[in-house]
Amino acid sequence: MSDSHLHPVKPEWTKNALIDNETYLDWYKQSIDDPEAFWGQHGKRIDWFKPYSKVKNTDFSNGVSIKWFEDGVTNVAYNCIDRHLEKRGDQVALIWEADDPSKDKKITYRQLHDAVSRLGNVLREAGVKKGDRVTIYMPMIPEATYVMLACARIGAIHSVVFGGFSPDSLAGRIADCGSGVVITADEGLRGGKPIPLKANADRAIEIAKGQGFNVQTLLVVKHTGGQVRWVDGRDVWYHEATEKVSAECEPEQMNAEDPLFILYTSGSTGKPKGVLHTTGGYLVYASMTHQYVFDYHEGDIYWCTADVGWVTGHSYIVYGPLANGATTLIFEGVPNYPSPSRFWEVIDKHKVNIFYTAPTALRALMGAGNEHVAKTDRSSLRILGSVGEPINPEAWEWYFKVVGEERCPIVDTWWQTETGGILITPLPGATDLKAGSATRPFFGVKPELVDGDGKVLEGPTDGNLCIADSWPGQMRTVYGDHERFVQTYFSTYAGKYFTGDGCRRDEDGYYWITGRVDDVLNVSGHRMGTAEIESALVAHPKVSEAAVVGYPHDLKGQGIYCYVTLMAGEEWSDTLHKELVAHVRSEIGPIAAPDKIQFAPGLPKTRSGKIMRRILRKIAEDDYSALGDTSTLADPAVVDDLIANRQNRK
Ligand code: WTA
């Protein structure tokens, strides 16, 4: 990496920073040398009803068992709300910026306490008990955070499903975790367009019923006032139910290792897995990373543009910031509505100090032209963050120079749904920045690069990224399938957590994430399994076989490229192409819509029948120079045919 992309810490970044480089090095060493002592001390950043006496009890071998603060008792909602009331009851907890730029709302900690307590009582009256699952399918409105916190308050396990998923996907997730209560809104609104959430939820509940699972209660927030179908005895209006109950709701006593939430995420094989996070360690880690990575100071206005349907929304819109007593902004809309100035206008309107977004949004806004940024002020900004996919140095430099006017450090934060919080990241007052690098590990995180045989590599090198020991925010299991947890993350390299990412470490010990090394795609920062898209395609009656790979895409990072073989007698046509795109949208959701489909009379397979994706990736990239050895293919001629017929792609 050339020095032009090196940005040393500026003196003004260190001046009031919580952590300077010396402190970083000192704390990091302590955290690795004696994790018990380090986390024993930092675990006290949250309030415990009963203090823990044990800190770390983790084993990455022997069936994998991960426990932190295991005999401590606490409650996440209590920590995110109640404990702040005395000091900051009237401080704004949430700023809601609607899709419509003329609408917004501010909610204080006291109001948050009221809303969450009432909702907790509504859920309790609906029969929800500690340990029960509740599915949340909501737009980005304040009620989305109320319902998450209400579940945490009464000890119910929430499963938030992103509003861009189809009824089929929602049904699968409702049934998998056995969620008797679902919470939604009449409609969502994005870029002026309504999203039929209630209608999708109705359909999903029907599908789940067909699979033998019955939802008893559908709680509905009236948001747009759009028309909805109503099922008496099952459907309940949120505003009516919350009016009738008391605003006193005792928080449940939760053991540190009691589950807090399930979040479904895609892997390289099979159906999405329910990533399970628990109470104490997760909150300690989410709040600590939020504070230090964003150099959060009292009174800062903090904005993360993610959706609560993803882990970033869980840890860095809701739990981390609120545990720290911050003012967190939630945004209903999209970056380019009503114009590509929207982000910067919202920053000016609410005087945002810390701004956290995704590379895909930055690339799109960069393409829209600097004038949309230049006409705004942005002088409130102090820290910029990036998450979700590798940020290319061009987008990084644009973010730094045009958006931040070289005043604001950028924290490029690498982490995963599974990790619960940020693992590799700069700290604003401590870390010299290199555009495109996530830089150094956070406290307590021990990255290792290993080769294909699991040998740990030292010094500057490329390798597969593993984490050698546990940190408190780590997922504990796959909901209902611990064996899958062990197989997916701890069997590739025995005794280590394998991330699925490739990575380079440079001569300064900085980490550069190079992207997934498994069959997972990252499309606009959304994680998707190729296997899921393939199974959606082959569910279409005219498709006999499908193989899906990623290819480089200017805006999305990766695009979805599908090779499709048709049933005998079926003809490839524009109509069929459209039908297949629509089919995937309805099976999984609009976020999984194929970018390109190529009709393929045959797929390159080994003699044992395994599809050689490496070759398909090369053809999708139009790179025929390095197809590698094709002699092991059952029928090498298939490859020539795929190259010759690539005009068949649409
Ligand atoms: C990728 C999102 C490079 C990575 C928090 C990871 C990144 C996957 C970065 C997890 C980053 C996330 N630089 N790549 N700063 N952040 N990724 O579970 O491939 O939706 O494995 O969690 O996103 O995606 P997930």
Image (cartoon, helix red, strand yellow):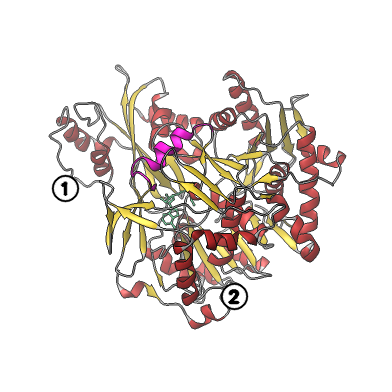
Please tell me whether residue 162 is drawn above or below residue 636 in the rendered image. Answer: below
Element at label 2:
loop
> In front here: 503 or 598?
503
Confirm whether the magenta stretch covers residue 586: no
Q: Which quadrant is home to the N terminus? A: bottom left
> In front here: 112 or 235?
112
Residue located 68% across and 50% down the image: 76
View extreme (front): residue:
53
Of labels 2 and 1, earlier in sequence is 2
Confirm whether the magenta stretch covers residue 481: yes
Image x and y of residue 75, in percent: 70, 49
- Tell me the quarter of the picture where residue 174 sits: top right
Magenta region = 480-498
Badge 1: residue crowd in 10 Å (few <14, some 14–19, many ≥20): few
The residue wearing badge 1 is 625
Q: Is residue 108 visible?
A: no
Residue located 45% across and 49% down the image: 524
Element at label 1:
loop
Pointer 2 residue Cβ closer than 8 Å to ligand 1? no
- Tell me the quarter of the picture where residue 355 sits: bottom right
Q: Is residue 520 visible?
A: yes
Q: Label 1 is placed on what type of residue?
A: Ser
Image x and y of residue 362, in percent: 47, 60
The residue wearing badge 2 is 379
